[in-house]
Image (tube, helix red, strand yellow):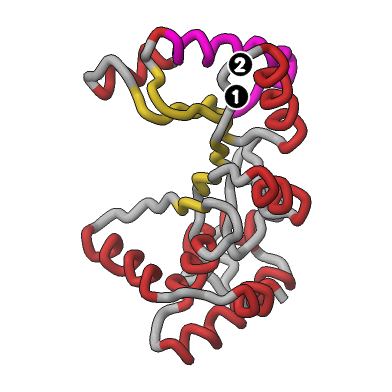
Amino acid sequence: QLDVSLNRLQTDYVDVYFMHRDNTDIPVGEFVDAMDAEVQKGRIRGIFGGSNWTQERMTAAIGYANKNGKQAPAALSNNFALAEMINPIWAGCIAASDESYKEWLTKHQIPNFSWSSQARGFFTDRAGRDKMDNAELVNTWYSDKNFGRRDRAIELAKQLGKNPIHVALAYVLAQPFPSIPLIGPRTLAELDDSIKAFDIKLTPEQVKWLEG
């Protein structure tokens, strides 16, 4: 997979590399050994980590690396958003939104590159308690807890003169661990709109209030 990535990027190294989706049938040490070998070759020059990996497997991988003198995984790419994923978008995808994972990320200061950090439109007009036409939104994000968070994001956005999606993205940025939201704008206008989230600096109290 690294060969494929390097060929597509037309380069001979990467600064960050993620192992996408874990295979728990393979001992975690085999993954660490393979990644460490690529680091030694200079094909991974920065950090590597896991995408859609459980807390338990990340802990095991770091422990194995430290015990055996290997470079340890130093980044995660799991879902993280103000709306918590109630059902996987697809098989094998994992969130880092539960309290245990957040505490782990905070303790170790592991950066999380959050995919679907805007909950795929849940904080826009695409979603609503009476809007059931988008099956993915309904199956993945519709819950009383998430709608409560959406209501509070709307309320705070009105106070700040922003849109709810800006508040939702600011929430991801306001975590006590390095949190890098990944977004998928389809136009420059959508990118410019998302950037407005940087104007919002949420306090820890506001973060807790949004969570409910």
Q: Is residue 190 or residue 64 the one in the foreground?
A: 64
* Image point (53%, 70%), residue name: 127
Instruction: Residue 157: say if magenta.
Output: no
Q: Secondary structure at mark 1?
A: loop
Q: Is residue 130 visible?
A: no
| Label whose residue precedes the other's in the sequence (1 or 2) | 2
* Image point (58%, 61%), residue name: 175
Residue position marked by numbered label 1 in the rendering: 72
Q: Nearer the viewer, mark 1 or mark 2?
A: 1
* Residue 6 coordinates in the image, percent (x, y): 31, 18
Quadrant position of residue 193: bottom left
* Image point (53%, 51%), residue name: 178
178 left or right of 195 in image: right
Q: Is residue 97 above or below residue 162?
A: above
Question: Looking at numbered disc 1 in the image, what kind of residue is underneath it?
Answer: Ala
Q: Is residue 140 or residue 84 the one in the foreground?
A: 84
* Residue 169 coordinates in the image, percent (x, y): 47, 65
| Mark 2 crowd level (few <14, some 14–19, many ≥20, 10 Å Cα) | many
* Image point (41%, 27%), residue name: 46
42 left or right of 85 in image: left
The dot on residue 32 is 2
Highlighted range, magenta: 21-40
Question: Looking at numbered disc 2 in the image, what kind of residue is underneath it?
Answer: Val
Quadrant containing the C terminus is bottom right
Q: Is residue 138 visible?
A: yes
- The reply to whether dot 1 and dot 2 touch (C-beta < 8 Å) is yes
Quadrant position of residue 186: bottom left
* Residue 142 coordinates in the image, percent (x, y): 66, 65
| Mark 1 crowd level (few <14, some 14–19, many ≥20, 10 Å Cα) | many
Instruction: Residue 26: say if magenta.
Output: yes
Q: Is residue 175 above or below residue 71?
A: below
